[in-house]
Image (cartoon, rainbow, N blue to C red):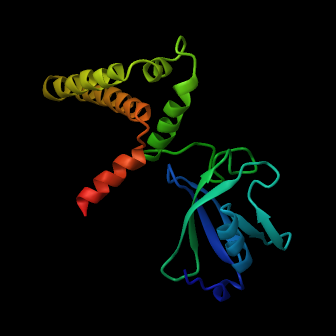
Amino acid sequence: MNIDFEKGGGLVPAIIQNADTLQVLMLGYMNAEALRATQDSGFVTFYSRSRKCLWRKGETSGNRLALIEMTVDCDQDTLLVRARPAGPTCHEGTISCFGSEGAQGLGWLADLADLIRARKTADAKTSYTAKLLQGPLSKCAQKVGEEAVETVIAALAETRQDLIAESADLLYHLIVLLAAKHVSLDDVITELQNRSS
């Protein structure tokens, strides 16, 4: 990766993006030393312009950013860093420095998938998701089949809103089934991408 540190006086902006949801989390700056520290440690490290030193995100809070990948832009003077956050990214306690809301749109599905996976150990008496995940796999699969049929019926004979509601039920139950089989949404997306190339 060839980065032009000279253009910015030894620093390049580093846009941090959640590797799962694609939500932009923050903007920091890196010099060559911060870049090496990030690559060597596997955790995002910045150069603090105010303190004039390196700082690893989460070194005091524990809310680290685990490096997944880095790419440089076409001008070779800005980094896009895909990372997996361990807690809130912003010093104000929000997931992103660009607002308090979590991921939106399709990125929200990654948050839902995380929530579903976390329910594997929840109390099955109080959590429908936990009940599905802790029960027989056949029940999860059956629910996907039932919801698929209801989605087809809604598409052919019911209202637009009915189709939306049944599609939401189908998608939820499919994500539960994937979690039960230890398959991620990324695995499915990769398969779709492979088919389109």
Side (left or right) of 85 relative to 130: right
In the picture, residue 77 is in which quadrant? bottom right
Side (left or right) of 148 relative to 20: left
113 vs 98: above or below: above
Residue at horizontal 43%, vertical 43%? 184
Q: Position of residue 80 (x, y in %)?
A: 55, 67
43 vs 169: above or below: below
Outermost residue, left direction? 156
Residue at horizontal 73%, vertical 68%? 46
Residue at horizontal 66%, vertical 53%? 97
Q: Position of residue 14 (x, y in %)?
A: 63, 69
122 vs 83: above or below: above
Outermost residue, top direction? 125
**On-image quarter of the C terminus:** bottom left
Residue at horizontal 57%, vertical 16%? 123
Side (left or right) of 197 relative to 178: left
Q: Position of residue 175 (x, y in %)?
A: 39, 34
Outermost residue, bottom direction? 6
Side (left or right) of 12 relative to 190: right
**On-image quarter of the N terminus:** bottom right
Count of labels shown? 0
Q: Which of these two is toward me, 104 or 152?
A: 152
Q: Which of these two is toward me, 117 or 104?
A: 117
Q: Position of residue 81 (x, y in %)?
A: 58, 65
Q: Which of these two is toward me, 139 or 16?
A: 139
